Amino acid sequence: MAVRLCVYLRTWPEKLTELLTQRPNVTMDNRKPPEFSIELSADRSSVKDVVKEGLGILHTIFFHRFFTPIYPSSHDVLDLTLPYVSEDDIESLIETKTTALVRALDTASTQQSPQYTSKAGRGSIVLQFLEKKRRKAGWFGVKGEEETVWENWVISVTLTSARSETEAARNKTSMETSLQKAAMKVVTLVNAERGHIPPITTNETNPFPYQILVNPRTDGWTRPF
């Protein structure tokens, strides 16, 4: 019998209160933004499950780091019940990027393409949260805003291949276990690692921009692409 796991989450007022009453102790200008790594495994024969896993984890992260009033929602991924952010822009972005990752994995498994940096059977998605800062005046006195990264989430996906029904069952169990561990790790990290979150200094609906990169090169994650 499948075991169902529901990840319980804080409400929007609680998240906002914590953010507004908290100030970082260390300036982000003097250190590299934190990077959190999440590992997932998926069976190569079930592409839909790969997409579902990516969707589930990304939505879980967004639920805790998207500081905009949202209507709490959830969806089932394999045998887990995970939070879901019902925002059209976020839904579209996540689906587009996870689908791109699956295509990249499929391409890399048949031939090593220079377009992708991942090895066959393994790929990654990087979710970045950004902060808008006032750019200092340069030689020509030009000012403006620039976006800097204050948090990175690296989600690595490893594909497995089954040569028998026994291996297929084992892979499915491994996939469910990795997703459960990943979901709980996200919840633990977002609650424990909060000191680096920038204060909200804008009246914009979404104070912190975000972006998702598929199989990026590692020499540039701290800069927006």
Image: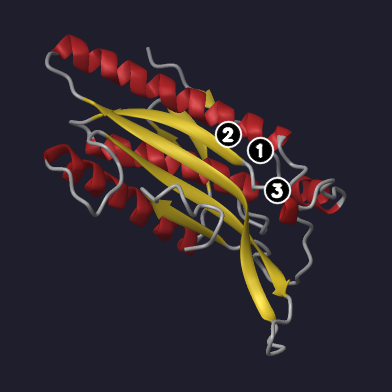
Snapshot quadrant of residue 64: top right
Distance of label 3 from label 2 (alpha carbons): 22 Å
Q: How is the image coloured?
A: secondary structure
Q: Are marks 2 and 1 in contact (CB under 8 Å)?
A: yes
- Residue 186 image label: 2
- Residue found at the very far bottom of the displayed protein: 140
Please give the residue where the numbered disc 3 appears in the rendered image. 31
SS class, disc 3: loop
**Looking at the picture, which amino acid does disc 3 mark?**
Arg
- Residue 190 image label: 1
Mark 3 or mark 2: which comes first in sequence?
Answer: 3
* Residue drawn at (77%, 50%) of the image: 13
* Residue drawn at (40%, 41%) of the image: 54
**Looking at the picture, which amino acid does disc 2 mark?**
Val
Q: Residues within 10 Å of mark 3 (few under 14, many from 20)?
A: few
**Looking at the picture, which amino acid does disc 1 mark?**
Val
Q: Mark 3 against mark 1, which lies toward the viewer?
A: 3
* Residue drawn at (39%, 51%) of the image: 216
SS class, disc 1: helix
> Where's the N terminus, which quadrant?
top left
Position above or below: 162 against 132: above
- Residue 66 image label: none
Distance of label 3 from label 1 (alpha carbons): 19 Å
Position above or below: 92 against 116: below
Report the side of 118 relative to 8 (left or right): left
Q: Residues within 10 Å of mark 1 (few under 14, many from 20)?
A: some
In the image, residue 199 lies at what x, y percent?
79, 57
In the image, residue 55 lies at what x, y percent?
41, 44
